[in-house]
Image (spheres, rainbow, N blue to C red):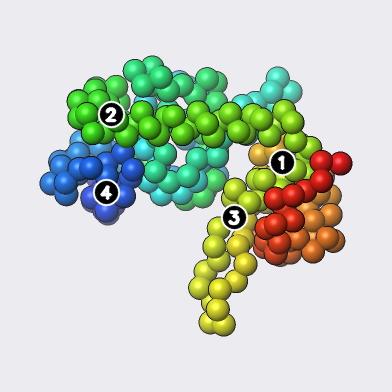
Amino acid sequence: MTARIEHRLDKHGYLKDVDIFQDLTSEEIAALGKHAPMREVGAGTLFYSPLEPTEVLFILKVGRVRLYHLSPDGKALTTAILDAGTIFGEMALLGQGLSGSYAEALTPCVLCLMSRADVVTLLLGDPRIALRITEMLGRRLIDAEQRWSEFAFQSLPQRMAALLLRLAQEPRVRLFGPGAPEVRYTHEQLAEMIGTYRETATKILNDFRAAGWVELRRGKIVILDRGALQNVDPG
């Protein structure tokens, strides 16, 4: 099964667009791909759990991943939403730790998996890649600080608005011109991402709809007024 997946995936195509490999030649990326196993996971798949910890570094090439903690009463608290091109995992060598986090694919994902030995020989052994990793980890730290600041100082409506803007994706091309950005997540998922209950998230979204800022459709939320969402009143 793994061999069939490896054959079907275009490793060179997936790796060449990752930021940390942008300084490599096509030949170098091809050589790297021979030693970098890839894995496809479906939306909703829990592919890392602190209940079964392992030292592994993930490179997210396609899709979007959610990292979250579980409270003692089982309530999920999202700590990060990762986009394609991000590296993450449990790797002390890089100062990377999931710290008890679960990793869930929010959308269909393609992941590159690396062991400690792979990281030493394939990544840190090349100063160009090592520099890009340092830059990426610095950006991750800034993003994490911003997210914790939102949790500490913003109201739930403000957090919901910021989340919608962060998750918004450009819609598929339409016959009569471009449409509005869309967010394709359930109310339950959005609630977990801002640390509240589904009923509360639904009420906030209904308030946004009543104000004319979003449109709620089956399976998606359409962003109608970015400016209004950027300036939600803290009350």
Labels 4, 2: front one: 2
Identify which residue is drawn at 44% across, 29% down: 138
Determine crowd level at label 2: few under 14, some 14-19, many 20+ residues with C-alpha closer than 10 A. some
Residue lying furthest top in this view? 92
- Say what secondary structure mark 2 lies in: helix
- Say what secondary structure mark 3 lies in: loop
Q: Amino acid at mark 2?
A: Ala
Identify which residue is drawn at 37% across, 46% down: 61
Q: CA distance from mark 4 to mark 2?
A: 16 Å
- Of residues 6 and 234, the one nearer the viewer is 234
Does residue 173 sit above or below 142 in this rendering? below
Q: Are marks 4 and 2 in contact (CB under 8 Å)?
A: no
Q: Amino acid at mark 1?
A: Arg
- Residue 48, image x and y in percent? 48, 30
Q: Which residue is mark 3?
A: 168
Labels 3, 2: front one: 2
Q: Which residue is mark 2?
A: 130
113 left or right of 206 in image? left
Identify which residue is drawn at 86% across, 41% down: 235
Determine crowd level at label 1: few under 14, some 14-19, many 20+ residues with C-alpha closer than 10 A. many
- Residue 6, image x and y in percent? 26, 47
- Residue 195, image x and y in percent? 72, 34
Counting residues from the N terminus, which is met first, the one under dot 4 or under dot 3? 4
Q: Residue 159, which numbered label?
A: 1
Q: Which residue is mark 4?
A: 16
Q: Are marks 4 and 3 in contact (CB under 8 Å)?
A: no
